[in-house]
Image: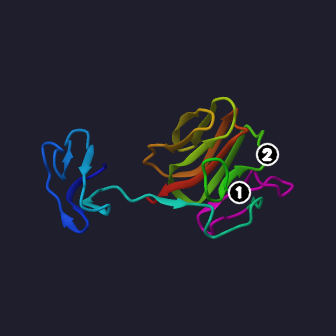
Amino acid sequence: MDFVPESVTVGGKAIARRKDLEREGYTFDDSTHALSIRHTTSRDVDIQGKSERVPVSYITFDDPHLAAGTILAGQYPSGLIDWGADTSGKGEWQIGTPFGKFGTFTLALADAKTARAEFQFAVPLIFAGMDIYNDGDSDATVTVRSPEIRETSITIKPKELRRFRTGWRDVSSRVAFDFANGQGLRFDNLAYTRP
């Protein structure tokens, strides 16, 4: 957790912080911020607390809905990301169908063999990351960089779905991706925060 819980409720009733989880309650490690909860009376759990961090927002590629195969050029969603286009008007990214371990529309490369693609934020935002699925038969590596921030990389094993987080805290104007063995990659839940 990136905050200290002030209250934890199960089914609308507060549960106590405990030293162990032999009974319903929760434990919280103040040094690692790891929270563990044992709840037996309800499946509805609510954790409240304060954080200095701004919550992450997501682009899911489902809303506003564009048809599968639509090449992204210009802004989508409006006012958030400019996907660009080359001189012929062809973009690097497209809306993909539900695929592999993704049950909703996805983001895909317009040309699966592309080794580099990018997008620009309409206004500088903090790129927090995205979910990446590798449908390929070998490890795929994605390296993400921004002119304003250091680069970071992730390797995704075949048939693996990973939530990739950059750890960036500064805004980016442009985000570039380099792909190694990226032919089977699909993306979803592009995460960003406002400064």
What is the distance, in whole Å, between disc 1 and disc 2 at their CAs?
15 Å
**Nearest the camera: 34 or 98?**
98
Q: Magenta span covers which residues?
A: 74-94
Q: Is residue 63 magenta?
A: no
Check disc 1 and give the amino acid type. Answer: Thr
Q: Please determine whether, in this image, residue 195 is positioned above or below residue 165.
A: below
Residue 73, disc: none
Residue in view at x 26 percent, y 44 percent:
33
For the C terminus, the image quarter is bottom left
Residue found at the very far right of the displayed protein: 88
User: Residue under circle 2?
Assistant: 111
User: Residue under circle 1?
Assistant: 97
Which circle's residue, 1 or 2, is located before the other in the chain?
Answer: 1
Residue in view at x 26 percent, y 47 percent:
35
- Mark 2, secondary structure of its residue: loop
- Mark 1, secondary structure of its residue: loop
Counting other residues with Cα less than 10 Å from the Cα at mark 2, is it few (<14), some (14-19), or many (20 or more)? few
Q: Residue 41: where, in percent of width, then height?
A: 24, 61
Counting other residues with Cα less than 10 Å from the Cα at mark 1, is it few (<14), some (14-19), or many (20 or more)? some
**Nearest the camera: 53 or 19?**
19
Instruction: Give the number of the mark in front: 1 or 2.
Output: 1
Q: Residue 16: where, in percent of width, then height?
A: 14, 55
Marker count (numbered): 2
Quadrant assignment, res 55: bottom left
